[in-house]
Amino acid sequence: MGQYFLAVDIGASSGRHILGKAEDGKIALEEIYRFPNGMKNLDGTLCWDVEELWGHDGTGA
C-alpha cells in the first residue's frame, strides 16, 4: 500500500485539490476537486474571500 498526499493549489481564478499517491518509487497525481476563486472588492481594496476559500477545504466544516 502506498502513501497518499493532498495538495491544494489556489490560483487567481480557480483552485483545485490534487491527490498524490507514492508507491514503488513512483508518484501518480490526480485532480479530485476544482473550485472557483476570484478577488472581492472590500472598501475599494481587492482581496481574496478567505472564508469562501476555507469552505473548499474538503472538511465540510
Image (cartoon, rainbow, N blue to C red):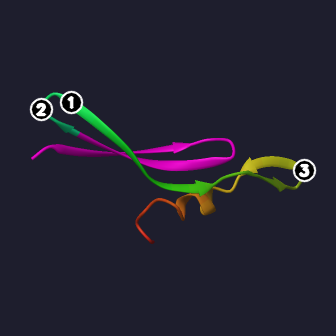
Is label 3 or label 1 in front? 1
- Residue displayed at 84% across by 47% down: 45
Task: Name the N-terminal-most of marks 3 and 2.
Answer: 2
Callout 3–callout 1 Cβ contact below 8 Å: no
Q: Amino acid at mark 1?
A: Lys
Callout 2–callout 1 Cβ contact below 8 Å: yes
Q: CA distance from mark 3 to mark 2?
A: 52 Å
Q: Residues within 10 Å of mark 2 (few under 14, many from 20)?
A: few
Residue 39 - label: none
Region in magenta: 1-21
Residue pointed to by mark 1: 26
Residue pointed to by mark 3: 44
- Residue displayed at 53% across by 54% down: 34
Look at the picture and state if 5 lies above or below 53: above
Q: Provide the secondary structure element on which disc 1 rests.
A: strand
Q: CA distance from mark 2 to mark 1?
A: 6 Å
Q: Residues within 10 Å of mark 1 (few under 14, many from 20)?
A: few
Looking at the image, residue 7 sits to the left or right of residue 40; the answer is left
- Residue displayed at 61% across by 41% down: 11
Q: Residue furthest bottom?
A: 61
Estimate the x, y position of residue 61 in percent, counting from the top left. 45, 72
Estimate the x, y position of residue 52 in percent, counting from the top left. 62, 62
Q: Residue furthest left?
A: 1
Query: Which of the two residues, 51 or 4, is positioned nearer the viewer here?
Result: 4
- Residue displayed at 24% across by 46% down: 4
Q: Amino acid at mark 2?
A: Asp
Look at the picture and state if 23 lies above or below 53: above
